[in-house]
Image (tube, helix red, strand yellow):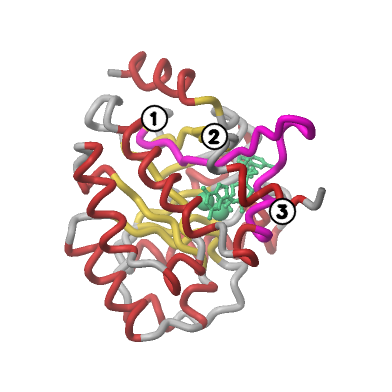
Amino acid sequence: RALSTELRGALDRNEFLLYFQPIVTKEGRIRAFEALVRWNHPKRGFVSPADFIPLAEETGVIIPMGEWILQQACVIAAAWPSDISVAVNLSPIQFRHSDLVLLVNSALQESGLAASRLELEVTESVFLEATPAIKTALVKLRERGVRLSVDDFGTGYSSLSYLRRLAFDKIKIDQCFVRDLPHEQSGAAIVRAIIDLATSLKMTVIAEGVETEAQRRCLLSLGCHELQGYLFSRPVPAEEANVLASQQG
Ligand code: G
Ligand code: G
Ligand code: MN
Ligand code: NA
């Protein structure tokens, strides 16, 4: 059967689960975990979100799925020490077709998670069609105390003007810019420019896809604030994230 047909039933059959990848400070302390959804298919095994998120977006399944992800991430994070946050990815479709403010409010309320411990990751594609409704939702979420991050920064073909108009707390440098560090001159130049821009706008800069010690050193020398990648940890199941979180407490 087609993957798209199965996707619809997968949520009811409890086939999705969340993995968590640490986001660490310069000193290597876990500051947050990014929630990353996985589909544990009964026959196919683990299906990558790169394969099913686009499908979920086309079919609209991303709406109930996104709701479940948000609720589940908040419940799991509420059990961590209170200085550890959770970052949740939002699809642009969710901005168009669901009341995100309502959704976030109920996820926070039901889990008891403090708003300041929830970070929402939004890709630049959201700003390509930043309607007044989307802008209002972003402003309301921030007023509620939730943090907002620009995900995959530098890959969205979007103009930078939204950074002036919308208040974001963090920028995540896409891993494609990190990959060639520290050897590629142009890579380092782009990363330096992003960090300088974000820092002057008082935003926190997170580098993604950090795999080597040399990349870590290079990013820190360029002024990067936080790091994420296989060098520190792969995405791990919730139980393992709980252990990592409590070891730090
Ligand atoms: O986890 P990684 O393995 O393979 O994720 C692949 C892609 O799927 C990334 O672009 C990531 O942002 C996206 N993704 C992973 N988890 C989620 C999620 O919970 N919601 C949304 N909208 N995208 C996700
Ligand atoms: O689009 P988003 O940034 O949410 O996607 C994160 C993706 O990056 C996930 O698929 C995650 O598994 C992957 N990822 C996380 N750390 C690393 C890393 O160090 N190297 C590589 N190649 N991928 C990573
Ligand atoms: Mn992300
Ligand atoms: Na990203």
Residue flagged by tag 1: what amino acid is it? Ile
Question: Which label number is shown at residue 30?
Answer: 1
Q: Which residues are magenta?
A: 31-55
Q: Is mark 1 within 8 Å of ligand 2?
A: no
Residue type beneath disc 3: Thr
Considering depth in this image, is 249 or 12 the residue closer to the camera?
12
The earlier-in-sequence mark between 1 and 3 is 3
Mark 1 and mark 2: Cα distance apart in space: 29 Å
Residue with the mark numbered 3: 5
- Left or right of residue 121, residue 210 in this image: right
Q: How many marks?
A: 3
Mark nearest the camera among 1 and 2 is 2
Residue at disc 2, CB closer than 8 Å to ligand 1:
no
Asked whether 18 falls inside the magenta stretch, the response is no
- Residue 37 lies, in percent from the top left, at 55, 41
Report how far apart the C-alphas of labels 3 and 2 lie in the structure: 15 Å
Q: Residue at x 39, y 30 (%)?
A: 30
- Where is residue 149? Give x, y as percent: 40, 58
Alpha-carbon neighbours of circle 1 within 10 Å: few (<14), some, or many (≥20)? many
Task: Indicate the quadrant where residue 39 lies.
Answer: top right
Name the residue tied to disc 2: 14
Q: Nearer the viewer, residue 79 or 187?
A: 79
Asked whether the viewer can see residue 126, the reply is yes
Report the quarter where the C terminus lies. Answer: top left
3D distance between C-alphas at marks 1 and 3: 38 Å
Q: Which of marks 2 and 1 precedes in the sequence?
A: 2
User: 117 left or right of 16?
Assistant: left
Q: Secondary structure at mark 1?
A: strand
Q: Residue at x 69, y 48 (%)?
A: 179
In the picture, measured across the screen, residue 116 lies left or right of residue 5, that is left
- Under mark 2, the amino acid is Asn
The vertical placement of 138 against 132, above or below, is: above
